Amino acid sequence: MKKFVFLAVALFGTPLFAVSITPEVNTLGYGLSAGFGITPLFGIRVAAHTGDYSRDLHKESIAYNGKLKFNNFGALLDLYPLASSFRLTGGVYGNSNKIDLASKPGQTITVNGVPYPSDAIGNVTGDVKFNKTSPYAGIGWGGKPSGHGFGLTFDLGVLYQGSPKLSVQAHPTNPAIVPASFYTNLEAERAKTENDIKNYKYWPVVGVGFSFSF
């Protein structure tokens, strides 16, 4: 009977309403997470991140302006196996992250090995998207929703987002003079590029934060 009592205290000794709030920056963007203590061993967290990052991209003879846009929301379960703030984390993210692409003006656009003048083709835009539901697994330190006060947090994990899906569109200035072969070659180029990036299924997650528990 005593063993049962000690086990119950260990599992349920932390009040449900112990809370930690953590502003954080990581490779999913910048945002906020809120943790809720269930027991001394388990906690749950919700997290939301946003942000963007721009850079120039080159695919063969097409130069793009690229922008990575973060927009994600996570529901996470934390396990604290040791008498410390070290944790194992698993959960799932609603993943609306994407990459927007726009060809740079004033260049010859080479599609599937065939060059086309930009004054006829106009510009090419596209985006890369991922699975809307993405499992997450990782480890971390800090943010345990028990006790009071401030602390630092660290996260290291991986998000499985599936094979990227690429879409592209042409915006010709004069559609009447665009060769019919252009659209065939554009689709062939899209399919080839999507195949080239199909193995980028995992997104590394590294982040730090500053938590407040109460």
Image (cartoon, rainbow, N blue to C red):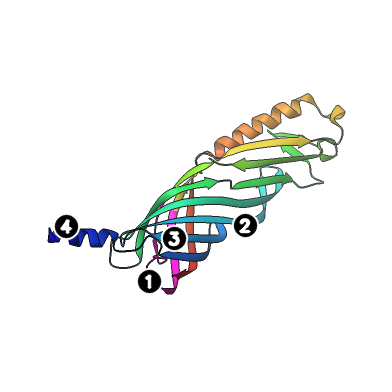
Place of residue 64 in the rendered image (x, y in percent of width and height, measured from the top left): 71, 47
Q: Amino acid at mark 2?
A: Gly
Kindly identify the amino acid type of the residue bearing the numbered disc 3: Gly
Residue, disc 1: 147
Who's the residue at 40% across and 67% down the image? 142
Task: State the CA–CA distance, disc 3 to disc 1.
Answer: 13 Å
Going from N to C along the chain, the mark reached first, 4 or 2, is 4
**Residue underneath mark 2:** 51
- State the image quarter where residue 179 is shown: top right
Give, as a three-letter code, the residue at label 1.
Gly
| Three-letter amino acid code of the residue under disc 4 | Phe
Instruction: Give the alpha-carbon distance from disc 1 to disc 2, as whole Å.
Output: 31 Å
Say which of marks 1 and 4 sits in front: 4
Q: CA distance from mark 2 to mark 3?
A: 22 Å
Secondary structure that dominates the magenta span: strand
Q: Residue at x 70, y 29 (%)?
A: 185
Q: Which mark is residue 35?
A: 3
